[in-house]
Amino acid sequence: MRRLIAALFCLVALAGNARALDNGLALTPPMGWDSWNHFACHVSERDIRGITDSLVSSGMRDAGYQYVIVDDCWQGPRDAAGALTADPKSFPSGIKALADYVHSKGLKFGIYADAGDRTCAGRTGSRDHEQQDAKTFAAWGVDYVKYDWCTAQGSFPPDAYKAMGDALDESGRPMLFAICEWGVSRPWDWAPSVGNLWRTAGDIGDCFTCVGRPPGPWLAMPQLDFKGPPPSFVGRMGLGVLQVLQLQAGLGFAAGPGHWNDPDMLEVGNGGMTEEEDRTQFSMWAMLAAPLIAGNDLTGMTNATKAILTNREVIAVDQDRAGVEGERLRYTDDEEVWARPLADGAQAVALLNRSDQARVISIDWQRLGLAAGAEKVRDLWRGHDLGSFAGSFSANVPPHGAALIRVAGGR
Ligand code: GLA
C-alpha cells in the first residue's frame, strides 16, 4: 500500500513538472529594473524615460538587464468602453508611447496590474477584466506583467492567476507573467504551471536585519489547506534581506528554466544598507536563481552600486543555464552556507556571515559531494583564481558579508 502511495506521489510530481508553463520566456531568471522600491507611487513617464536612458548609459543593459517595469500608480480610470487608461497627469503620453520608447533603446517593457478590484495603491484593478486588460497590454506592446494580490479577497489565488495567465496567453503577444501574492498560498506548489515567477515572501525593505510586520487579515484564505509551516510568519511589508532569505530555504525544487521563485526585488543602491550588505543581497539572489530586478535610482548611481549590479561573474551564477536553485547546507545564528550546481559541473558556494563580527567560514568538499582531493577555487567578486585547496576552503568574511566562490574540478 505504502509503495502504491509513493508511486502515486511520483506520478503527480512528474505530471506537475510536465505541466510547467511553457511560453518560451524567462529561460534564465529575468533581469531588469522596477519603479516601486525607489519611486513608489510618485512615478511618471519622465522618470521612466530617464531610467531607461541610464540603464543603457550605465552599461546595465549590456550586463543583461532587459526589462523596464512600471509598478503601481500608472493607472487612470477605465474609459467608456471599460479599457484601462494611463494616469493623465503622470503618464500624459500614454503607455504605448512609453513602451515604444523603451523598445527603441533595445529593452523590454513591463507593467503592473492587480487581481483585485483595486491595486495596493488604490488604482484600478483587473478583476473581471482579465481578457480586456490582457488585450490592452498586448496592444500597448507590453512584454512583462506583474500581477499583484491586493483587494482580491474572495478569490482563490490559483484560479485568479490562471484567469490572467490564460488571458495573456490568448492575447497573442508573449508576455512574461510574474505572480505577486507574497507566498501566502504556497505558490511554489501551484504556480510553475501558471506563471514564469512567483513571489515567495512579503515586500522586501531596504534593510539587512529588519523583521517585517506581521500579516494583516487579507491573508486569511480558508479555501487553502496549508501544509507545513503555517503562513503566519509571512509579513507583507518591510522584510529584511536575512528574513527574506530565511523564507527561501527548501523552495528550490519548484524552480527551473521558465519558472522561478521570486524573493522580491533588489534594494542594492537604495541607501538603507551598507555596501557590504548590498553585495550580500546580490550574492544570495544569484545563489537563489532569483530575478535580478534592480530598484534603485539609476540616474544617480554611485560607482560602487554600479560595480555590484554589473559584476559579470556573479550575474553568470544567477543566469546559469542549468537553472538549478542553490540549496542551504548550513544555518546557524551566525552563518549560512549555500551551494549551487552549475551547468559546467562546477559549483557556486556562498559563505554568509550573519553576525556583527568578522568570521572565518569553511566549506568541506565532502559536503559538496566532492572527493577530498584538491579543488580549484575562484573568488567571483574579485574575479581571480585563489588556487587549489585540498579537502576544504575557508574565508575570512566581514560582518554581514558573503564570500562567493566557484569550486571547480568535478563532483
Ligand atoms: C505590493 C507588491 C509590491 C508593489 C506594491 C505596489 O505591495 O508586493 O511589490 O508592487 O504592491 O503597490
Image: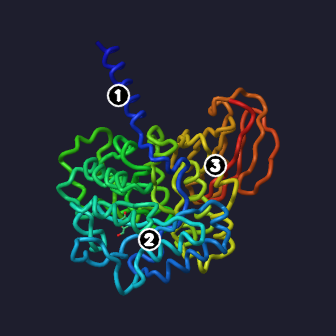
Label 3's element? Answer: helix
Point out residue 40 in the picture as x, y percentages from the top left corner. Answer: 41, 75
Work out whether mark 3 precedes mark 2 in sequence or the reverse, and give the earlier one.
Answer: 2
- Residue at mark 3: 317
Q: Quadrant of the C terminus?
A: top right
Q: Residue at x 69, y 73 (%)?
A: 303
Amino acid type, callout 2 = Val
Q: Quadrant of the N terminus?
A: top left
Q: CA distance from mark 3 to mark 1?
A: 31 Å
Give left or right: position of 73 versus 39.
left
Judging from the image, the colouring scheme is rainbow
The image shows residue 324, relative to residue 54, as above or below, that is: above
Q: Quick one: label 2, few (<14), some, or many (20+) residues within 10 Å?
A: many
Q: To which quarter of the image does residue 227 belong?
A: top left
Q: Is mark 3 within 8 Å of ligand 1?
A: no
Q: Quadrant of ligand 1?
A: bottom left
Point out residue 169 in the picture as x, y percentages from the top left corner. Answer: 37, 51
Point out residue 161 in the picture as x, y percentages from the top left corner. Answer: 30, 52
Q: Residue at x 25, y 69 (%)?
A: 118
How many numbered callouts?
Answer: 3
Q: CA distance from mark 2 to mark 1?
A: 37 Å
- Residue at mark 2: 70
Q: Observer-nearest residue: 200 or 97?
A: 97
Work out whether mark 2 precedes mark 1 in sequence or the reverse, and give the earlier one.
Answer: 1
Amino acid type, callout 1 = Val
Q: Is mark 1 within 8 Å of ligand 1?
A: no
- Residue at mark 1: 12
